[in-house]
């Protein structure tokens, strides 16, 4: 299915289906992070090992508030500021945060932390709001290939999939995928 309806796309996620959708810089693949079967479908589409983990994408800070609770006030403030005080064309930041028991092991991979981004991309914000929480966000491409930058790219990569759904829309204005920073140590994982 290809749709421009956020409600239809959110319904797909709620039904345990996988969705390709535009993000700030590249197309992503997403699913309900608590649906292990859908998650494994993404790994199969990408030929990606589970050990690597994936990013969780939220539409509002309230959706990830529980993951910020153990951070010091200074770190928490820095993380929130990076999500709320950036221009629409500025590169997004994904933070590695301490994972609590609510985060499924398959989301983290072999890591003790979970990668989280609160987006300002209007379509992604609307999708997370309609879904009712954060969703999986990993680039829409087979391992080793460049991330899809258009609906046509995503369809070409996954043309053999009979179950993948597409939410058509525009990419954000960022030219690069998000930076990834460990919130606790400050280590830059992806510059």
Image (tube, grey):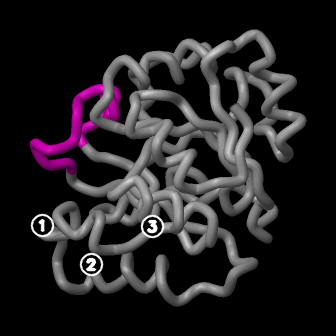
Circle nearer the N terminus (3, 2): 3
Where is 38 relative to 182, above or below?
above
Please name whichever residue, 19 or 55, is drawn nearer the observer in this view of the structure: 19
Numbered circle sitting on residue 59 = 3
Expressed as whole percent of the image width and height from the top left, the position of residue 179 reads 58, 60
The chief SS type of the magenta part is: loop
Structural distance between the alpha carbons of marks 1 and 2: 9 Å
Circle nearer the N terminus (3, 1): 3
Q: Quadrant of the rendered structure where residue 91 is?
A: bottom right
Question: Which residue position holds label 2?
Answer: 76
User: Quick one: SS at disc 3?
Assistant: loop
Structural distance between the alpha carbons of marks 3 and 1: 21 Å
In the rendered image, the quadrant that contains the N terminus is top right
Question: Which residue position holds label 1?
Answer: 70
Numbered circle sitting on residue 121 = none
| Extent of the magenta region | 99-112
Structural distance between the alpha carbons of marks 3 and 2: 17 Å
Expressed as whole percent of the image width and height from the top left, the position of residue 57 reads 46, 55
Residue 181 seen by the camera: no
Expressed as whole percent of the image width and height from the top left, the position of residue 166 reads 69, 38
Expressed as whole percent of the image width and height from the top left, the position of residue 64 reads 28, 64
């Amino acid at each position: 299915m290809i749709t421009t309806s956020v409600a239809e796309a959110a319904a797909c996620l709620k039904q345990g289906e996988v969705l390709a959708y535009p993000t700030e810089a590249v197309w992503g693949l997403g699913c309900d992070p608590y649906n292990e079967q859908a998650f494994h479908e993404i790994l199969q589409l990408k030929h990606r090992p589970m050990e690597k983990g994936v990013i969780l994408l939220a539409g509002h800070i309230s959706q990830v508030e529980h993951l910020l609770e153990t951070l010091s006030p200074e770190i928490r403030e820095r993380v929130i500021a990076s999500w709320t005080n950036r221009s629409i064309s500025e590169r997004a930041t994904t933070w590695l945060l301490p994972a609590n028991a609510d985060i499924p092991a398959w989301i983290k991979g072999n890591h003790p932390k979970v990668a989280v981004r609160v987006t300002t991309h209007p379509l992604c914000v609307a999708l997370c709001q309609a879904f009712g929480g954060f969703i999986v966000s990993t680039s829409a491409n087979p391992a080793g290939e460049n991330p899809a930058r258009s609906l046509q790219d995503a369809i070409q990569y996954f043309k053999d999939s009979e179950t993948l759904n597409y939410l058509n829309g525009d990419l954000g204005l960022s030219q690069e995928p998000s930076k990834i920073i460990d919130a606790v140590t400050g280590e830059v994982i992806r510059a």
